[in-house]
Amino acid sequence: MLRYLTAGESHGPALMAIIEGLPAYLSIDNEQVNYELWRRQQGYGRGYRMKIETDQVEFTSGLRFGKTRGSPLSFTIANRDYKNWGPRMSPTGLPPNDLQVVTKPRPGHADLAAALKYDYSDIRDALERASARNTATLVAVGAIARQLLAAFHIHLFSHIIQIGHESVNTETLHTMTMEEMARLAEQSPVRTADPEAEKRMMAAIDAAKEQGNTVGGIFEVIVTGVPVGLGSYAMPDRRLDGRIAGMLMGVQAIKGVEIGSGFESARQLGSTVHDAIYYETQRGFYRTTNGAGGIEGGISNGEAIVIRAAMKPIPTLYKPLPSVDMVTKEPYLATIERSDACAAPAAAVVGENAVAWVIAEAFMEKFGGDSIKEVKRNFESYLLQLKERS
């Protein structure tokens, strides 16, 4: 089984992760991992921190000559900004005499709840780990997972469908192939495949920034090539849709997730929501619609998996909201940390890689082996079984 663990703080020496369960002899391209890290740092509305960091993965174990060994794989991502924070974030020694303790929690962050839960006297002990900077390790973990998936022709892409009140024209998207949609989104500064919506979205970000405010958005992740049979209906924690939703809700600032037609299905009749099943000798079982978003009963059904996630506006505002000092209990305006006017395009990349991990995890549960050759043998045997049933 695949599993991972991450560690690190926003302004600490480095971010790091350990992955266990990768089969031996899987080729890992570190430049592909670095490319995903680069994609995470792009997007219209990103802040100054992205100009400081140039994220690069450094593998420290589990690889030899670019191939996995079947042992735990570990890596680090250096925080370049640590040189400016060393005395304030040193893992060892005593705090400096001039240490500025953070006691003013920011509305919308983990600050207050975490400080109360862990009995922190300095909110920085919470905000450093809670920071979305830590999505860099999640992206790197997902980038490794998607290299496993690519070996079996499973691919992912994402695009923005809404920023603030500005949405894409769904009729425009329906005229595109998935390849066209992915290509256009990759070229867009706001990761949208609709050129007209792009202009309006950028204007919405500009307007929020001028007001010292922030704006959120909705992104869609699409996974192609997933075979029938990942996940299970047998137990709630094995349902593929539940696992995907849980993973995405674990990404900072994500407040809602839907699969397929999602919330819209609650407003429709069953006859317009569910995907009729057809059969042809040469084609096997097939559908002409995908309202289920590729998952039925917690199991992948062979259609493209379609997920949407809603990201709230970044809570750090340059015109901050009222807060209360935890020590003096006096009212203050909330502390300002460096922030983005909009991080939804970057969140889409994080979402892609988060979903990649869940799909890879379910894939290895179904077809797992100690070497990539064994996994391929199990996979091909299963495809033959499906062909015999069709």
Image (spheres, rainbow, N blue to C red):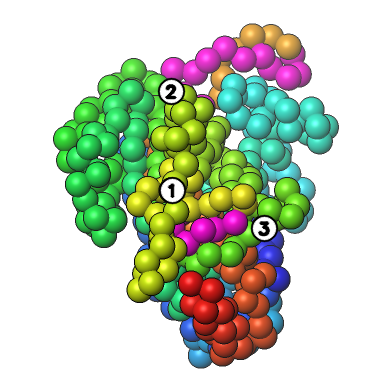
Helix, strand or loop for disc 1:
loop
Q: Amino acid at mark 2?
A: Tyr
- What is the magenta range? 299-328
Residue at the top extreme?
331
Label 3 to label 1: alpha-carbon separation = 21 Å
- Helix, strand, or loop for circle 2? loop
Q: Nearer the viewer, residue 159 or 312?
A: 159
Residue at image point 53% right, 65% down? 228
For the residues labelled 1 and 2, the Cα–Cα distance comes to 51 Å
**Quadrant of the image occupied by residue 209:** top left
Classify 53 as above or below 266.
below
Residue 173 drawn at (x, y percent): 24, 43
x, y percent for residue 299? 59, 56
3 w.r.t. 161: above or below? below
Q: Residue 18: say if magenta.
A: no
Q: Nearer the viewer, residue 193 or 133?
A: 193
| Above/below status of 238 relative to 29 | above
Question: Who's the residue at 62% across and 51% down the image?
Answer: 298
**Which residue is disc 1 drawn over?**
276
Tell me what residue is drawn at x 59 percent, y 21 percent.
107
**Label placed on residue 318:** 2
N-term-proximal mark, 1 vs 2: 1
Q: Which mark is residue 232?
A: 3
x then y, percent, for residue 108:
58, 25
Q: Is residue 304 visible?
A: no
